[in-house]
Image (cartoon, rainbow, N blue to C red):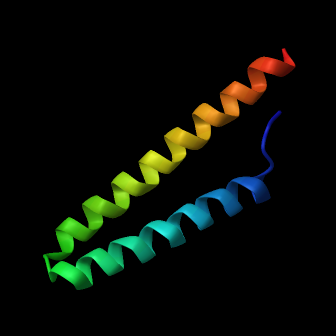
Amino acid sequence: MELSKLEWGLHIGWLTLLGAGVVFLIWKAFQTSQLVGVIFLALLIVGGLIGWRIEDESTNSTSL
């Protein structure tokens, strides 16, 4: 099942907002450099996409 552009946008937007919120809290807690925040944000987004992709593939395998 292919995702529509709207569904992709919602997933990316949700992950971005979640990641940005967590990174902001971490950054404020430790008052670290901005680079650390960017790295955390990238890791959260990539991790979320990988987890979502694995879940998506497991549901696709049952429909084959």
State left or right for residue 1 relative to residue 49: right
* Rendering quarter of residue 53: top right
Which residue appears at 69% of the width and 53% of the height?
Answer: 8
Quadrant for the N terminus, please: top right
User: In percent of the image, x 44 and y 66: which residue is there?
Assistant: 19
59 is higher (above) or lower (below) than 45:
above
Is residue 49 placed above or below 9 in the rendered structure?
above
Q: Give above or below for 21 relative to 44.
A: below
Residue 24 position in % (x across, y down):
34, 79
Q: List x then y, in percent, for residue 20.
A: 42, 73
Q: Where's residue 14, x and y in %? A: 61, 66
Q: From the viewer's perspective, is 8 left or right of 15?
A: right
Q: Residue at the location (50% across, 39% down)?
A: 50
Where is residue 56? Give x, y as percent: 69, 34
Picture quarter with the C terminus:
top right
Image quadrant where residue 45 sits = bottom left
The image quarter in which residue 59 lies = top right
Towards the viewer: 18 or 16: 18
Name of the residue lying farthest toward the top: 64
Query: Viewer-proximal residue, 8 or 49?
Result: 49
Residue at the image position 60 percent from the left and 66 percent from the top: 13
Q: Which sits in the foreground, 3 or 62?
A: 62
Horizontal placement of 63 versus 54: left or right?
right
Give the total of numbered labels: 0
Q: Would you say 41 lies left or right of 48 here?
A: left
